[in-house]
Amino acid sequence: MRRWATWAIGGALIVAAWGVALITPPEDAFERPFPVTVGVGERGEGRNIAITVHEVRRAEAASAGEWTAEGNWVIIDLDAEAVISEFGTLLSLATLEVDGRTYAASERPDSLRRGSLSVGIPRSGSLAFELPDDVDPADAVLTLGLDSDPRLDSLIVVPIDLSEIDVESDAELQPSEWSTR
Amino acid sequence: MTHGWWRRNAAALAAVVVLVPVTVGVIAANEWSDWDLGHPTKATTVDAGDSTIYGGATIGPASAEFTDDAGIPPGTRVVHATVLITPADEPISCLSPLLRETGGAQRQWDEASFELDRDYDPSLKTSCDSELPIRYSLTLDYLVPADATGPFALELSTGDALPQFVRLVVEP
């Protein structure tokens, strides 16, 4: 084989190897979730979960029925339903990511957290997130899913700008009930 | 020369042709049988009005109708279904059947007496009674959205007979 051909083939192989390395998916790609990103007011539908976030509120105190507590609260009002099956359809994953930290929905008030979802029949209610007092949140990401392990299933992801939302003195969670919207 | 090579290795090549598919088949069958063990995967479809023998009992006939119900959310209705269960020698145990749409995305609903706030009535059964050796019927209510128009199938299974299960077609 001619010398120039050897060099050309060698160079081509190196470029090809670089291309393969470039397009190789990362190691966790085979178990990644399937995020569905929507805005506030839009319906996001995944494999077996459909969510519409209607309103985001902030307050210095949250209340639900008899229960009330002061704190740095973010309240999410939403509708949630299942899509194809009611087997194990609880709203088990509800997190709010703020400044690189992930907060789980508070278990203190009665809310849609771990609420049971029906196929095609939305339930409405609220989720409450209690942030540390010294956190003045701006950009946040709400993530909702059916399993506390988010891998390999649909997640509804809602980016929220919390700096635009006025802080009320008190906010009441919506009761969890069949949606009438 | 190439001809000679194929001929010399004929036995080995034949073994490869046989053994590769057999290996794939054995591994696949093994994995699938593990999956089948605990899951209802093999359906016996029973047409509306018919019955079948399953798990030592006669299941069916089943019937269903749409009913209006006070206090259900807007845009929904109730599928009210009954299934006749006739145990033979031994009582049969089962969970509440689930309701599945036979068309479209094959959505499924769980029995909803609890969500519908039904008063408890011990004579109305929503699942098989593992202590009752005589004929009885299951009385089932499913809350479905108005766009679920049927036909539906009631899917009933008992642990002993898995992966077999019964799919009773009902057309409300």
Image: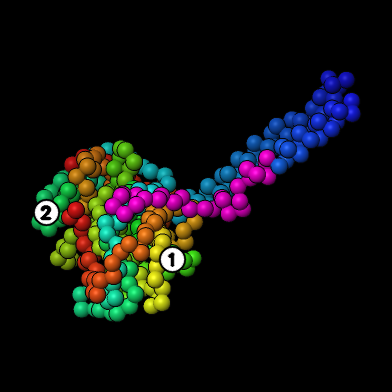
Which residue, given by chain and number where applicable, does mark 1 sit on? A98
Specify how the rendered protein is coloured.
Answer: rainbow
Give neighbour class at mark 2: few <14, some 14-19, many 20+ (Cα, 10 Å): few
Amino acid type assigned to the residue bearing label 1 in the image: Val
Q: Position of residue B105 (x, y in %)?
A: 34, 41
Compared with residue A23, is residue A119 higher up or lower down, i.e. above or below? below
Q: Is residue A173 left or right of residue B4?
A: left
* Magenta highlight on residue A154: no
Q: In which quarter of the image is residue B49?
A: top left
Q: Quadrant of the C terminus of chain B?
A: top left
The label number, if any, that marks residue B69 in the structure image:
2
The one nearer the camera, B95 or A7, is A7
A10 relative to A47 in the view: left or right: right
Residue B142: where, in percent of width, then height?
Answer: 22, 52
Q: Is residue A5 above or below residue B79?
A: above
Q: Give the range drawn in magenta.
A: A19-44
Identify the element where label 2 is drawn.
loop
The quarter in which the N terminus of chain B is drawn is top right
- Left/right placement of residue A60 relative to residue B139 reads right
Q: Can residue A41 be seen from the camera position used here?
A: yes
Q: Is residue B144 left or right of residue A150?
A: left
Residue at position x 12%, y 58% in the image: B71
Q: Say which residue appears at 83% left-offset and 20% top-offset.
A: B3
Check residue B62 in the rendering and tell me which mark sits there, or answer none: none
Subunit of label 2: B
